[in-house]
Image (cartoon, coloured by chain):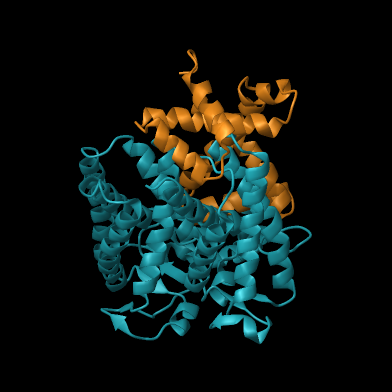
Amino acid sequence: MSETASLPLGSCQQLLDLIAEKGLIQAAMEHEAEHAAMRATNFGTLAFGLSVIVASVCVFLFLGRFTDKLWRRIAVMAIGVLIFEIFTAPMWINNSLGRWAYVYADVSWILTLGWTAMILGVVVMVDHWFATWSAAKRFGVYVGVLLVLVLIAEIVVFNLGIRRYAPEVLESISGLRILGVPIEVFYYAPVFTSLIIAFYKYWIFLIDGVAMVPVKRRNWLRALVIGFIAVFMFELLIEPMVRNDNFPAWSYVYHDISFVMTCCWVVIIAVAALLTDRFLMGVPVPIRFGVALLVIGALMLPIESWLISNGYRVYGDSAVANFSGFTTPITGVAAEVAFAIPFYAALMVCFIRHWEIVLDNHL
Amino acid sequence: MKHLAYVCLGLPVSFVVLSFAIGGPVNAAAFIFITVVCTAGSSLALWIPMWWGIGLFLCKVVLLLRGPDLAGEMRNSAGSPSRNREELALTNYVRLARVSGMDQVEIKRRLRETGWPDAKIDGALSTDDRPGDE
């Protein structure tokens, strides 16, 4: 089997052409039939899919003995995992899980379920066993344990032929592998789990009714440092998806990651935080969160569009192939770029707020 | 029934937003159709919770603006509305902190650390002490 393969949703532009040519229903049927082979299961992948479902159910039943509000916890964790998977979809290719196993492009609900059970299991059990430890120490334990588990899971999905990597990812990695999995998993896995756990924890603070001290005077230096760490480590992770070109040479800190670009995103997040602090104190957190995402989206979309139009941000072929072909009016960027902004913002805001809450409340 | 209402509210709202975002209702319908077809229907497991979430969010915003707590305080405020929102945030925190077993000294210390003046802290602590505020 080849290392890379064509992307299932990349053909949706072809589907649009087909719709114009043959009508909606006929086009949809032909398109689906065309891609059925790529998604068709074999014995190994079918067994894997069923094992993941059974194991996840067992994990959830087991966790029910150690925690309350289990369904809410599962839902929050699954949303976090799904946001991450959809955002980074162009970097991975997930094949052979069955026609019904995908929710968007090649993002599979079976893998989402598996990651959700794995991460939630570790978080709940570490919280149970190390309840007296500080939140920061427990966070380190989650990430450490999950590094081992993610590595094992990645080896399994790669060797079953389910997981392949986009060409841009293969170009950007060192070439060193552990049973087929790039050694870069030692960076990807901690970033992946850190962002998702921070997302989960932030919302669980609310669900559990943790007393979170309202901040009259935000520690901006600390907030900006956390924001910079979050944005930078995420930029590093998604480096194969998008290239930063034509920035001043001095601004490149690693490969094509520009200090200017990172600072720009951090400043936009800070502006959203400033506005919500100023005008929405005392308003329920979900509404503040929603407004913050709208503010970030309203600021980021035109900037991202301008950067794309002027050749500063160049999306890789796999990302472009994943675009459905729809574009936003006025700015003309791919709809997926516009939709990715709130996903990105949700992960960043939750990461920053999680650590601010932990530090402000001595958790 | 309530959850179905959230979905029914979220669906048209997200459709309108999507229409603006990708150039018209035909494109929006095609986009949803494509994602559903390309995933043999499984993406409805993504769309329906999203519609539910949008519906819930909108309902909460409307309730917040019409509700007696925040909006009422803002409307009745002779002074600065932001002052009332601050007081509300402080009172809520004090209440939750007490429920979680935190003592008054610790509550004061944490509020001071995050920049609150003593007068406001004492005001929130005394407000939360009042009968009927529990």
Q: Quadrant of residue A114?
A: bottom left
The residue positioned farthest toward the front in the image shown: B118
Compared to A274, does A305 lie above or below? below
Where's residue A276, x and y in %?
Answer: 64, 44
Residue visible at 34% across and 31% down? B101
The picture places residue A171, in percent across and down from the top left corner, at 47, 84
Relative to A76, A291 lies left or right = right
User: Which residue is at 67% across, 47% downward?
Assistant: A275
Say whether residue B58 is left or right of residue A360.
right
Residue A209 percent location from the top left of the image: 41, 34
- Give left or right: position of A114 versus B83: left
Colour seen for chain A: cyan
Answer yes or no: is residue A139 visible.
Answer: yes
Give the vertical position of A261 relative to B50 (above or below): below
Residue at the image position 42 percent from the left and 74 percent from the top = A165
**The one of A173 and A271 positioned closer to us in this rendering:** A271
Q: Colour of chain B?
A: orange
Q: A245 or A109: which is nearer to us? A: A245
Q: Nearer the viewer, residue A323 or A240?
A: A240
Image quarter where the N terminus of chain A lies is bottom left
